[in-house]
């Protein structure tokens, strides 16, 4: 293992790094997902409100939780820019108040409600009106169960409901938009997903279990160790894992490792210690992954100045 205990790495990682622990990292799909428990979680400042709603028991193996983000823009803050970083899970997103436009190299594209599948890329969005968003955070192996398509065919895609689901998607979006509140929206989407689940055929539970373990165990395991644990050859495991997770085990482990580092940011650890604890063996790998999946150098991303951070003061 490379020696990364010296001052050089610390200095590189902490370029312009001044911890601001009163910030929430909304870059991580709006919140640190591991804080979401089977009860309503509420985070609020003067202008922004975020909370989660647990799914019914039948959906808990597939839906991690529903979430709501509402924000009132002001004269002092006429727009809000959100950066969605790479993530190994899928989200169903509904803009029930105003919309976000996606910022791309070629300009702006309208960002309608839709499904953002597991992604190894970051994307940027802007809202210029006060907004309300309802969403569902879904395990990638639930994509084949809900939508009858391998996750390997949806990675890095973002599709509106009409394009992806046709008439059922249009009707679902209309019902969500007309619902009186977000608890009704959660019930509407729960009924929709439950119906699709009951009309689908169960897939390989071993791979679903493997993906859950990768996401939740916080263990730095190799692909060979994972394959051995589920009595599969590395080739079999790689093929089945990609079909259900959307990415190869190696890429998925990189995504999860980055999100583990983000979850640990709220602690008093240095970036060097966080990187070591998450299994990065040298500074170049850590810097490369943070840049590839967020678009930022680690020193800036973890400074509290990156797009998507809000102050709770």
Image (cartoon, rainbow, N blue to C red):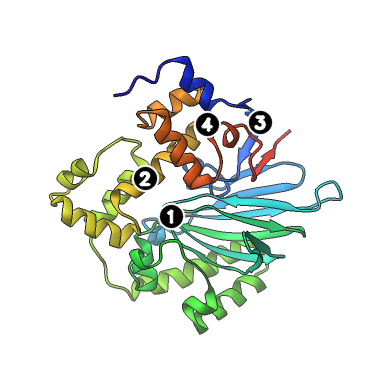
Q: Mark 3 points at which residue?
A: 22
Q: Which mark is residue 265?
A: 4
Q: How crowded is mark 4: few (under 14 residues within 10 Å), some or many (20 or more)?
A: some
Foreground of the two, 280 or 50: 280
Work out how far the residue at label 1 is from the one at label 2, CA to CA, in angstroms. 10 Å
Counting residues from the start of the chain, the first of labels 3 and 2 encountered is: 3
Identify the residue at image location x=64%, y=57%. 125
Counting residues from the start of the chain, the first of labels 4 and 1 encountered is: 1
Q: In what element is the residue under mark 4?
A: loop
Dots 1, 2 in contact, CB < 8 A: yes
Q: Mark 2 points at which residue?
A: 215
Identify the residue at image location x=52%, y=27%. 13
Counting residues from the start of the chain, the first of labels 4 and 2 encountered is: 2
Q: Viewed as shown, does residue 17 lie left or right of 44?
A: left
Work out how far the residue at label 4 is from the one at label 1, CA to CA, in angstroms. 20 Å
Q: Position of residue 157 (x, y in %)?
A: 47, 65
């Amino acid at each position: 293992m490379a020696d990364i205990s010296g001052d050089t790495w610390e200095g590189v990682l902490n370029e312009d790094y001044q911890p601001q622990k009163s910030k929430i990292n909304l870059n991580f799909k709006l919140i640190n997902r591991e804080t979401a428990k089977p009860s309503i979680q509420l985070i609020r400042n003067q202008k922004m409100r975020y909370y989660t709603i647990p799914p019914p028991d039948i959906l808990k193996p597939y839906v991690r939780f529903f979430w709501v983000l509402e924000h009132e823009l002001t004269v002092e803050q006429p727009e809000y820019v959100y950066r969605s970083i790479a993530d190994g899970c899928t989200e169903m997103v509904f803009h029930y108040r105003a919309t976000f436009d996606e910022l791309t190299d070629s300009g702006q594209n309208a960002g309608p409600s839709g499904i953002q599948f597991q992604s190894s890329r970051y994307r940027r969005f802007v809202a210029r009106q006060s907004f309300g968003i309802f969403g569902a955070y879904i395990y990638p192996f639930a994509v084949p169960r809900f939508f009858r398509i391998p996750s390997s065919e949806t990675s890095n895609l973002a599709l509106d409901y009409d394009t992806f689901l046709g008439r059922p998607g249009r009707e679902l979006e209309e019902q969500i938009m007309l619902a009186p509140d977000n608890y009704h929206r959660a019930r509407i989407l729960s009924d929709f997903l439950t119906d699709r689940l009951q009309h689908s055929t169960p897939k390989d539970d071993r791979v679903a279990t493997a993906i859950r373990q990768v996401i939740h165990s916080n263990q730095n395991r190799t692909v060979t160790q994972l394959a051995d644990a589920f009595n599969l050859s590395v080739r079999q495991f790689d093929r089945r894992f990609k079909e259900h997770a959307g990415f190869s085990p190696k890429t998925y482990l990189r995504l999860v490792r980055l999100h583990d580092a983000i979850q640990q940011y709220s602690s008093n650890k240095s970036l060097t210690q966080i990187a070591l604890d998450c299994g990065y063996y040298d500074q170049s790998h850590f810097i490369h992954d943070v840049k590839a999946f967020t678009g930022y150098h680690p020193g800036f991303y973890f400074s509290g100045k990156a797009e998507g951070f809000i102050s709770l003061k």
